[in-house]
Every structure is written in C-alpha cells, then in structure tokens.
Amino acid sequence: MKIKLNGEDLELQDGAVLSDICTKLGIDSKGVAFAIDSEVIPRDEWASTKLAEGTDVMMIRAVCGG
Amino acid sequence: MSKLIIAGREFNSRLFLGTGKFSSNDLMKDSIVASETEMVTVAMKRISLGDANDDMLKHIVDKNIQLLPNTSGVRDAKEAVFAAKMSREAFGTNWLKLEIHPDPRYLLPDSIETLKATEELVKLGFVVLPYCQADPVLCKRLEEAGAATVMPLAAPIGSNKGLRTEDFLKIIIEQANVPVVVDAGIGAPSHAAAAMELGADACLVNTAIAVAGDPVRMAVAFRDAVKCGRDAYEAGLGAVTAGEAVASSPLTSFLG
C-alpha cells in the first residue's frame, strides 16, 4: 500500500504501523515525531497505530538550528 | 561564577549554544564540547525522502546536555503549540525555546502570539523559554504567564550587531524574577561579556560561533567571555563617575 509521508508517496507493506516508517527509511526513532490529521501521535502508540492506503502522515525530525 | 538554575535544573555554564549554520556536524560537535555548554538548541523539519540520512542528534554526545528544541518556522500560537507537542515526542523533553517570528526579513518575534502561546504551553506542562522583544512590559507578562526564563533579543537574529537593546535589557534584568537570557544578535565575545556584566543570567549564541573562521576557538572565547562577564557582575563593578578622574595613587608629598 501507499501512504503519503509529508506529501510524498511511500510504499509500505499492508498492515504497516507508524513505527514501520522509521524501519523503512532506516532512521533512528530518536528525534522523530509523527502526526496524523494534525494530531500528534504519542511515541508509545507508534507500534499500535495502523496505517491505511492513502493515510496522510506528517513526520518531523531533528535538524540543526539556533 | 554561581550556578544558573532554570525550572529547578542547575547549569554550570551560562552559555547556551545554537546548532545552526555550522559547516559540518563535526565542527558543531567540537564547538559544543569546547564551549562547555550544558544547553543546546535544536530545530525540527519535515523529513523528505531524499535526506533520510542526516542524523544531527548523534553529534550531541554529552548526556548532561539539556536539549532545547525550538519552534522556528511557526507563524502563530496555534502552530507553536502543535510544534511543541511534536518536539516533546521527538526529543523526550518538555523544555522548549518558543520562537514565533512570521516575518522572514527581520525575524522579529511576534509578541502577541508569543504571550498567547506561553500561557497555553505552561498550562500543558512545558518549560517555556520564550525568545522575545527586549520589552520590559512584555517580559513581565511572560514571567506572570509562567515562562521559565525570558530571552530578549540584543539585535536581530544572526546580525552580530551586539547589544543594541542595552537600555531595555537593563530594565528587564532589574525587574525580572526569572533568569534573563540574552538571545540573538550577540556577535562577539565582548558583547556576551557586556551582557553578563549588566546582570544577564546567560547568553544564547549561535551565528557568531558557527560562522567564525575557527568555530571551536571562538566557542572557547565565548565560554571565557561569559564566565568573565558573570564573575565581574557577581564581584560588583565599580561606580562610573561623571567624567572626572579619581586618583588611584596618593598624589601628595612624594618629592617633598
């Protein structure tokens, strides 16, 4: 299935959950946060938050800044 | 130099470091270590699938460093609250550098939205360190709203212009019951020392170190300047006269 990650298509296996995005992208989950429909998803719910075709996910990560 | 206490946490360093604009993560890492800072700002950005490999957090190695996520990029209080909630999940801290500057040309903080966001974020349990105008009335309002510090600007972000707001910083420092962190515009160690001599509790420096010819050496210079300025403040500076000299040596009867 395809989800929308920050507006870009991302292919994930059917039944994927939020935390699978980090695995798929090879990113350490430290410094990462997710929101779905403008709702921030608490870290302890990432493994149980199921994604569906077309789910619109916002993902942010730490970057340098002052 | 006495310890700085913010929201119950002790800091041995009164220099906070921003992590933007370094030419490499290694230089940033070495500058953080050399500065002896215990508070480091970080920003957040939407990930794009092309830049998945850039993990800046692994370059902040000292476990004793307090991460201070900022809300740079938000335009109003509503967006700031959303960014704060995201940062709490991302970094596992409720500390927040609140910055709301919708105008990209001067990056000046929106005082009304900053106060509104501070009120809301304090209710949500955040430790809020707001970047703000050097406005003594606003700083009192932020303090009353529960801000953990106030962080008035010395000059526009990244301008290196120094303490252009000095007269107002003095009033803010005189009136504040929370730590005053001079943020933005500090361009040289002498500016930081001057801010500390006024009685500022800390300085937040980014551009002046990051874009220096030798950032690591500049981090050391700022480390020492902040310490010197604070020590001078705590030691008590001598009074400034109206202009006439006051002799430091006896003037009488040396040659009879």
Image (spheres, coloured by chain):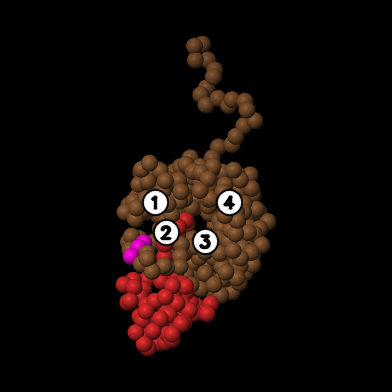
Chain colours: A red, B brown
- Asked if the residue under mark 1 is in contact with the one under mark 2, i.e. CB atoms within 8 Å, the reply is yes
Nearer mark to the viewer, of 4 and 3: 4
Q: Relative to B232, does residue B63 appear above or below in the rendering?
A: below
Q: Residue at x 60, y 48 (%)?
A: B169
Question: Whole-percent x and y of residue B143?
Answer: 61, 62
Q: Relative to B19, does residue B243 appear above or below in the rendering?
A: above
Q: Secondary structure at mark 2?
A: loop
Q: What kind of secondary structure does the magenta stretch mostly adopt?
A: loop
Q: Decide: few, some or many residues near mark 3? Use Cα within 10 Å; few <14, some 14-19, many ≥20.
A: many
Q: Secondary structure at mark 3?
A: loop
Report whether mark 3 lies on the same chain as mark 1.
yes
Give how far apart the Cα atoms at labels 3 and 1 are: 17 Å
Q: Secondary structure at mark 4?
A: loop
In the image, the segment drawn in magenta is B53-57
Q: Residue at x 59, y 43 (%)?
A: B164
Judging from the image, mark 3 belongs to the subunit labelled: B
The amino acid sitting under disc 3 is Ser
- Asked if the residue under mark 1 is in contact with the one under mark 3, i.e. CB atoms within 8 Å, the reply is no
The amino acid sitting under disc 4 is Arg
Question: Whole-percent x and y of residue B135?
Answer: 65, 53
Q: Which residue is mark 1?
A: B22
Q: Which numbered disc covers residue B72?
A: 3
Please check the rendered image and state whether residue B122 is part of the magenta-colored stretch, yes or no: no
Q: Secondary structure at mark 1?
A: loop
